[in-house]
Structures are given as C-alpha cells and as structure tokens.
Image (cartoon, coloured by chain):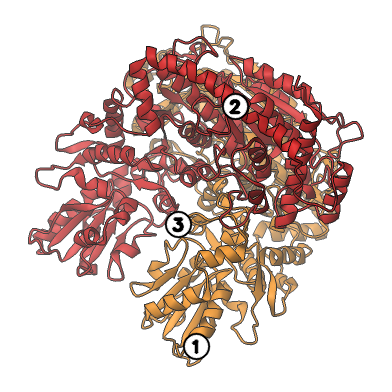
Chain colours: A orange, B red
Amino acid sequence: RARWTEHDLRAVDTARLLAADAVQNTGNGHPGTAMSLAPVAYLLYQNVMRHDPSDPAWLGRDRFVLSCGHSSLTQYVQLYLSGYGLGLKDLKALRTWGSLTPGHPEVHHTAGVEITTGPLGSGLASAVGMAMAQRRQRGLLDPDAAPGTSPFDHHVWVLASDGDIMEGVASEASSLAGHQELGNLTVVYDANQISIEDDTDISFSEDVAKRYEAYGWEVVDVDWRRSDDPAGTADYTEDVDALLGALQRSRRSRTRPTLVRLHTVIAWPAPNARGTGKSHGSALGAAEVAATKELLGFDPAKSFQVERDVLARAREVRARGKAAHKAWDRTYAAWRRSEPERAALLDRLVDGRLPDGFDRALPVFDPDPKGLATRAASGKVLGALAAGLPELWGGSADLAESNNTTMAGEASFIPKGKQTREWKGGPYGRTLHFGIRENAMGMILNGIALEGLTRPYGGTFLVFSDYMRPAVRLAAIQQLPVTFVWTHDSVGLGEDGPTHQPIEHLASLRAMPGLDVVRPADANETAAAWAEVLRRGRTAGIALSRQNLPVVDRTEHASVAGVAKGAYVLVDASSGAPDVIIIATGSEVSLALEARRRLEASGVATRVVSMPCREWFEEQPRAYQNKVLPPAVRARVSVEAGVAMGWHDLVGDAGRCVSIEHFGASADAQTIFREFGFTPEKVVRAAKDSL
Amino acid sequence: RARWTEHDLRAVDTARLLAADAVQNTGNGHPGTAMSLAPVAYLLYQNVMRHDPSDPAWLGRDRFVLSCGHSSLTQYVQLYLSGYGLGLKDLKALRTWGSLTPGHPEVHHTAGVEITTGPLGSGLASAVGMAMAQRRQRGLLDPDAAPGTSPFDHHVWVLASDGDIMEGVASEASSLAGHQELGNLTVVYDANQISIEDDTDISFSEDVAKRYEAYGWEVVDVDWRRSDDPAGTADYTEDVDALLGALQRSRRSRTRPTLVRLHTVIAWPAPNARGTGKSHGSALGAAEVAATKELLGFDPAKSFQVERDVLARAREVRARGKAAHKAWDRTYAAWRRSEPERAALLDRLVDGRLPDGFDRALPVFDPDPKGLATRAASGKVLGALAAGLPELWGGSADLAESNNTTMAGEASFIPKGKQTREWKGGPYGRTLHFGIRENAMGMILNGIALEGLTRPYGGTFLVFSDYMRPAVRLAAIQQLPVTFVWTHDSVGLGEDGPTHQPIEHLASLRAMPGLDVVRPADANETAAAWAEVLRRGRTAGIALSRQNLPVVDRTEHASVAGVAKGAYVLVDASSGAPDVIIIATGSEVSLALEARRRLEASGVATRVVSMPCREWFEEQPRAYQNKVLPPAVRARVSVEAGVAMGWHDLVGDAGRCVSIEHFGASADAQTIFREFGFTPEKVVRAAKDSL
C-alpha cells in the first residue's frame, strides 16, 4: 500500500495543474496525458523506483523511460517535485529556446532524463536494450551474486502509450523481451484509448493483453476506468494501491517482463477536456484550466501554485534516495574490496576509457590481390578485439554469418533454455541474436549504450538500414557510442537484386547529422576503421563489402594510419604533381588504383585518395584537407558504387562522378559492375573528361 | 479434398527438384523453402486460387503474394508448371543478368508476379493493402452485390515465412487487417522454424497463433511436422487435404482474415539438408541434389527433369482458368449492361486516365501576405478533387488533422461496428485510418496501388518518413502511383524539437531513385503540385509546411504553371540580367523573395527560382534548364531548411548554400529560423559572398 497522505494527494493534483499551466503558459504542448498520469508518475518516483535525486548518475539507480515522450511534462513535473534541480521557472519555460524543458525529453540535457524519446515505440524498444545491458553488465561485474543482491541489479520502468504499443518497433522489441525473459523490465501501458485521431477504436481494436501474453510477458490489468468509454464515468477511481501492488509484483518477477495495462481517462479530471483527443496535444484553454483548478480546490485565478508543505512532502524522496544510495554504497564497497580486478574494469568502463594499446590486438593482413571481403576482415577484427575489450558486444538481425558479427568462440546472450544446436550460451553471453527485427535491434543498441558501461554493435545488410533508420537517428541525436555494421554495401552483393542492393544508402546516411559513415577499402582499412570508431565513441556505421577486395600492399602505398583522418593519399601521382585526383571509397578504391595505372601509363599524373569517412575528413584542419585535395587540382573524379549525391562538393564544377543513379539488378557482381559502368575504362574516361 | 493424382504428386516432386536444380545450376539462391513449399504452392495454383494463366491481368483474378520473396522459385516453378510463359530456360537462367527469374520476384517484369517482394514483412503488409483496395473497388463499382457474387470479389493469398512474422511492419499491418475485418485475406505462414541463424528458437519463441488471435484473426494450425524438431521426424506428412480444408474455410470467412500456421520441414525431403539453416540460402551441393532425386525416384544424373504427362497434368489448370474466366465474363458483362456509368468509370480506372479537365476543380488562392500553411492548402486541394476523382483516397497515420489528409465530408473506410464519435463511415468509405503505424501505411498504400484501380495517399510528419522508408523504397522500385503526404517539413514545425524536426530528410529522400520529392512554396504551388503528381502517376512525396506561408501574388510573379517543370523563374532581376540567382524551395521561397528585395535595393540584380521538384527539373530539356539557371550566372545561393547535401551541384563552386547541418531545437518557429540563420540578412550575405 502506498499510504499516501493528504499532502501526497495534493502533490498529485499539483502535478496535474502544473502540466496544464505549463502548456497554457507556453500556448502549446501535451497536457492531457501528463494530467492523468500524474498519480502514476508520482507513485513511481516516490514509492517504487530506486533513485537518488541528488545523484542522477548513481550506478545503482533504476532507469525510467518515458516512451510517450510527447508527455514530457509527466517527467519534468516529477523531476521538479522530487528535487532533481528543475524549478518552476523551467516549467514556465516549457518548449522555449534554450530551456531545460524541451518539447520531448532529451538525455544529456536535463538532469534525471535517461533517454531522448518522442518518436513512438522507440523508448519502449530501447528500454528492452537497457534491461539486456543490465544483465550483461552484471555478468561482467558480479555474475555470482544471488538475484537481487548485487549492486548491479536494477530495474527498468517504462511509461508507454497506445501509440507506443501500435508501432511495429515495439512489437519487435517486446517479442525479444519475452524471449530473453527480462524480469527486470516493467512497462506501464497507459491505455487511455485516445490518440490524435481521438478514440483509438478507429484503428486499434486488438487485444493487447493477449498479444503480450503471446510474447511471454506477465500481463496485469489495472482498471481505473471500468468502462469502455474513453471519457470515463463517475466511477473513475485512481486506485493507486492496485497499481502499486502490480508494480511491486513485477519487480519480483525474475523470468518475465511485465506489462501493466492501466486503463485511464486522459486529462482527468478536467471537466470538459477529459477523455478527448483535443486534450492530447493542445492547451486546454484558460477557462478549462480554471475549471479544473476549481474542481481540485485550487485558486482558479492563480497559476503554477505549489504549496510549501506539499513540496516539502514530495521532496522527502531525496532523503529516502540518499538512504538507499548509502545502503547501496556499503554493498558496492564490499564488492570492490572482494573484486579488485572487476572494480578496475568498472572504473575504466565508467570513464569510457579504452585499455591502453587495445589496438595492438588488431590483425594485420598481408597484401593479397585476391584479398578478402571487408565483412570477413571485420569479423576477424572483432574476434581479435574480444579478449581486450569485454565491453564490446553485439550481434546481428539474423545475418550473423553474412555480417560476420560473431566474435569467434563467444557465447550467446540467451536464457539457458533457449539455446539451439547452433548457438550455445547463457544469460551473461556476448553474442546477440535479434531475429529479423532491424529497427528493434537499433533501438536496443541505443538502450544498451544508454545504460552506460558497454559498447554495442549490430549488423544487417546496408539496404536494411532503411528498416532501422529511426533508431540510427536517435543514436545520432543522443550521440551514443553505437556501431552499426552494414554489410553487402553495394550492387556488388550480386544476385539478390534490386530489393537488396543499396544505391542511395551511403548518401542518405551521410545526410544525417551526428553519424559517421565509414567505408573501408580493404582488410587493413577495416581494422583501422574499427579502431578509430572505438576511439571516437561517436555513433558510427561501418559499410562493408560482401565480395572479396584486394588487400593493398602498404609497402607501395600509404599506411592505414590515414584512415583516422577520414581521407588520405593512398598513392600519389608518380610525378608528385597530380593532373587529376581520383577519390574513392570502399570496394571502388581498387578500381581507382587500376584506373590510375592506366592513366599514368598514358601520361596522366594521377593521385588516388582513399576516403573511408567523409565526416572525419571534414573535421581535419583546412591545411590537411588542402594537402590531400589541393585546390589547384580541379580535375577530380569520385568513384563510389552509389548515387553521386554529395560528391559534387568535393569534385567541384570541373569534376566527374562515377556513380549509379538507378536501382540495381539481379546478376553476379562482375556482370553488374561491368553493365553499370564500374570499370577502369569508365574511370579513366571520367578522369580525362575532367582534365 | 484435393484428389491429387499420381501425376500431381509427381508434379510437386518435380517442382522441388526444379528448385534444387536451378539453385545448383546458378550456384546460389534459396532452395530449401521452395522445396518444402512446393506442395503448398502447387495446391494454391492448381486447386485454390481463381486465376487464368493466359490472362495474368484478368480483373477477376485472386492475388498471390510471395512475402518470403527470397523463395522466388516457389513462384517461378508454379508459373512454369501452370503455363504463364516461363520456360525451363528461364529457370536455368535464375538470378542472371536480364533473366525473367531474378533473385526476388519483380512485378512488371515476370508475367504472373503481382508484387516485388524480398524485404521481409513487406509482402504481407502490402497484401493487407490489396485486400483493403478490393473492398474499396467493390464499393465504387458494385456495392450492392451479395457477398461473393460480384465480379469484383476476389481473394488475396499470401505465403509468409518466420522472418515475415518477426518484422514489425507485419505486426502493424496484421493488427490493422484484423481491425478492418478483412475476410478476403489468407496468410499461409510457413512455420519451418528455420532462418539464416538456423533454428529460430534462438530469437523467436513467441506464440504466433495467440498473437494473431489477439489481432482478431482466424488462426488454423496445420501441422505436417508433429514435432518440435525443425528437422522433422519420420512422421512428416504433407497432408494436403488438411491444408486445402483450411484454405477453403478461409475463403468463406467474411469478417476475419485467416492465418494458417503450417508446420513444415525446410528442404523436405533432402536427406541431409532438410531442417537446416544451410538449406535456406545456399545451393545444396551436387551430391545432396542427386540423393534427393534418388529418394524421389528421379534420375540422379539428370537435371531439370519434367515428364511430359506430368507437365500436361499441371497445365490443365489453364483450361480450368479459362473456364472460370469465361463464367466471370458473363457476370461481368451483365454488370456492365446494368451499370453503364460505373463501367465507364472502370474503363477509365483500368486505363489509368484522369478525367478531362480534372484540374479545373483545383482551388485558386488569393494573394495573402499572412497566407496559409501548405498542409492546409493541400487539405483544400484534396477536398476540391474529391468529387471528380473517386479513385483518389487516403488518410493518415493518426495525424489526420495535422496532415490535412481528410477530404471534407468523406466517410471513413471502416467496418460499421468500428465507427467512433469522431469518425463515421462504413466498409466502402474513403478516409483511411492507419493508426500510429507509418511503415504499414506505406506498404498498404503500395498494395492498394498494385490492385490497380485506385490512387492512394497517406500522411505523416516528414521526420517519420524514416519509419516508412522501406515502403517508400518499394513504391519507387515498383513505380507505383502512390503519394506520400509529409507535413511539418522543417524545423519550422517549432516546439516539438529535434526528434520531430526533419533536417536530412529532403536530401535523403531525393537520394532515392524513382521518387519525386515535391516541396511547394505556397498554396497555389501546392495545388499545381498535386495536379502534376496525379498527371505523372509516379511515386511521389509532397513535403508541406506546418506554419503559414504567404500566398505569392501571381500578378507580380510568374504563374504556377512552372511547377510542372520542377523549377521556374518566380521573379527575375529587375534589370532582366541577374547578377545572382537564389534557388529556394517550399517555406524558404518567401525568404528568398525578401532577400531579393533587399539585394535589388542595394543594386544587386537578383533572380529567384522556385524549385518545388528537383526530379522534374532534371527531366527538362537542357535549354529550359539553362534558361532558368543560365550557366553564365555563377553567383548562386540555395535556400532550404535542411542539409545542403545535393545543392552544390546546382549552385556550383562559386555558390553558397543556406542550410542547417545539425539537429534542431525546441522553440517557436520564428526563434528557430532566426537562431539557425534562416533570415533575409543571411541570404543576402550569402548572395554577396557568391558574387
């Protein structure tokens, strides 16, 4: 039982009205859900979650994910009430330039916000990743502790809306959460039956409880509404104790995630707005806000009213949080004493430091004209890094063997009972199996990174980066150290044809701010690319070939050290003064080298620049950029098996782009490259045209 | 009962071996599923589907969707056996350049293929669109016929795999299919428990039957395997009659889609390959193919064996198909006689012709400095077109009011029992409600367009084009006349902040081949854009503003006729000889006009080019392009509230781009535009820099 005092009840009503006032004051926003979820959020922050408002980075804290990010006030108001540092002035500055209270919650911006949410389904899906990461972290640091006794045991709490539940990414991630038996995850599903098109019955009549049972979740119904009418009835009862019971039971569940389906009335108790679609995304209007205040016994003429006693009561959570933290500190200190090596590892992980000389483990590949696919090289790199970087882990969306994402010999991350003849492992394993669920994979990787201690990666075909684009964007917005492994990175994948051949993907991913797109040219560039991606700790995608690529002879060509600068002169004109520069990436670098041989033979001094990462190159000092691409050399050719978009700014008005501007075809790679003009002849011609 | 003869059984085994041979012959492909699904596909083509191999475009045909498109041989072999024109030479040319048998089925390429599939989940989701379109088409043409008696009644049959069922887009679409009570849809789910990572138990343990029951589907289990082992047992029995019974019952179902969960053993009966992940995507090897032939009583030394009697037996379906077609012709002729007006409409729809002068209905907006949002203009355009274009219909992914996608006064497309207080309608309604399921919306729009008679559109925020990108790409690959309505098309949407503000989206969508991206500058350009999109009948996305935009005075500026050419001189330099050209799109055109006023005032002769669609402009003759952008005028500025990527090729080395290269922020639109440099001052400075 919650044993709420009158002050607690008043604090809940205060929270509702702060939400209504904040939206009314700004003139726009989402008041309805923040009003009706006020008791739920207050319960979580005051009675359920383990957290310490004075230390939002406490390792032992539970995680809170507001998947219905549009209802950001649900969280902002609790951060204010429980003392995370937000003040009334911040609530008054809702959704204005530079405020701590933007339209949707933003991690690294507002203390207490764990994740940037807003795009529906994304928070819930990333929460699955948090829950998975918690288990992996425990496995790295304290695997033998009894359940619930480790300082690394914590719980992930999610508030989700009808919209979250409708999005496919939530389906994918929820199916995986059940499969992974994530007892450390609880989703409170606010079944208020209202979305922007009003009553969700217009498009959504599935049985959500049954669906989640099918995923293997524990499902609990808590019905405050007791009617099918989204506007509720006089019977509406915010039975906080029933909800608390469900949440407490869910924390004790060890082998199933829990969905608490809570039937609410949006904007409760606003007399006219409640239960309406309008209350979802618009200010209620001054009259309705006043009427609600009157109903709740507040002064209808005043805004942002917070009574001193009420705030004091709410802020008592700080003392409880500190006490919990202190108790945890003792367990944690005991763990540190008994596990000095693991404690040292933890310190390194908390700092986000790589071990000194981690890159000495990288394989070096001998020159080889036949060579190997960069995806294969990537697999070897991951295997070589495995021992030194326990924080690195990942897997694939059902393409492990194609993406080469499995570190050789590492166990699968999987409940014991879910092992198969091909894959052995356990709950603390390292190899992730996402199934054919690319978007959930991306969101889960984000959640893993947000947990803060490990470095996840995940693979699929480059063309299916489309399926996970919402997750990639959220990784980039949050600047998470997630690495996407995208293999089969051009029409060179061959016979699978146009639906599987990326054409526009390199360009469309480069268009995204905050994402490093890396396309290594051979096996050694692949190793250097991985090292640099790990060093930078930014969001990155590595594009890798399906087909074999020659391993460039580094005694005759520049060292791969240049990869870290994004672009470098792989081989200069024999004269030292190039007439033309060929800029190539990935599988087209060897084509550029062959074209150079022919151009040099015909007397054209030709430099080849390998440009594995445009974003890294753009960061270099202008002097370096001008050294690689001297402004005086205006004859330039870009060669990349994708659309030319974006290359014109590097090759300039005099330049030429060897590219593909249409969808691919089903045939072997050699034929496709020939038919689509990725030939030395074509590059030579482009170079001569450019001169 | 199927009453298969020995010849039928032999035809099924022939089909299995043709699949194994074709992959073995090419050296790569997906043999396993084609082998085990051979009896299923043969049953569908011979005993279940209404189709006429001599007329693949027959209006009365059932539709077949191979959602597991990698198993293209499942379909190619049946197209051969039932006489659609594919020959053994085509099977031998599997996955080679120019063949009729590419890696994945391609519509408009191989007779009998209704849809391009391959990306998992997409076929199933588009099939939901086909089933919806069938109902809408019936409503337009023959609404009063008793169920099952109209020439426009047909059924949609889908083969789907584990991978299809895992993808979120299938979840979204299946939830909608149950909601829409699509009795005309049957999905045979090939539960072979094998994907590329072998036994799907590694990532997929949900109860699929229960999940589909939760969506409101009829679920039937047909278990040929009777064991949990994906490799099956000696008990494996291809009980075709049990399957046929389930399919026949599903055809009779009026109010629920049906999922037949069929438990199979992949690659059955290959003695070693069956039940393995390897058989999914690799050639079985000569020895295994030979062993399978021996097992089935075929000559292990021969390939592509088809006995004359067996082929003759399979080809009898042609006569049955012709008879069914003839019977249908009589019903159809009777309908034409009794419904001459609807018959005339049908003829127009079959031809894909717009009514003469359809664009006379377009609204004309008066000049207005305050103006209106282009999304609002778009809503008015749709309303104005509604009466003249019954084939045009659409809706939104729960953003109807924000996207302005509802044609005023039109009924919702919804089962009678699913109406809500806000939305009234019926099964033949026109306004679609997709819920918060953008990717399913896109796939469903594709399915609607593939049905062939109507023109669908669907709306969401531009930023959420990310969620539907897989569908957009498939629309573009298939060149479907689908229109995506993407509103809130820049940081100008304001307070919702970075998760909701598109930055890279215009560029990333323009990177996609086959997609027209249209961004009108004001209300009248919006009307002209819609008209041109409808005229062209290509895949298009219209980007529309949330915020009000001035309605340009066309007495002082060029006519909107130029929209159809993609770009036009909106207003020239007062001198007639521009020093600088400002190229702008959408909401930035009015900014360009203001900058021009200031530039002209300071003596800089300035032309403003409005460029609503780069793809249309690129199609124009070089002479027109040079007239709009004279090569001699090298001082150029592009202005678009998105990344600059792609603009350099138009503004050239001397040009400047006014753009935004980072994520947005939460504030009102005016503040954001000012802070991010979308101001007349900035454009003026860029123009002067460029001079």
SS type, badge 1: helix
Of discs 3 and 2, which sits in the foreground? 2
Return the x and y of residue B189 as percentages of the image width and height: 70, 31
Question: Nearer the observer, disc 1 or disc 3?
Answer: 1
Please tell me which residue lies in front, A377 or B90. B90
Q: Which label was assigned to residue B321? A: 2
Percent position (x, y) of residue B191?
A: 75, 34
Residue located at (12% from left, 63% from top) = B605
In this rendering, the answer to whether A362 lies above or below A329 is below
Give the amino acid type for the residue marked by disc 1 in the picture: Glu
Residue positioned 76% across, 63% down in the render: A383
Label 3 – label 2 distance at C-alpha? 51 Å
**Residue furthest toward the bottom?**
A575
Q: Residues within 10 Å of mark 1 (few under 14, many from 20)?
A: some
- Marks 3,2: beta carbons within 8 A: no
- Report the amino acid beneath label 2: Gly
Disc marking residue B274: none
Q: Is residue A563 above or below residue A286?
A: below
Residue B43 position within the rendered picture, expressed as x and y whole percent measured from the top left:
71, 29
Q: Nearer the viewer, residue B8 or B252?
A: B8
Residue drawn at (38%, 56%) of the image: B643
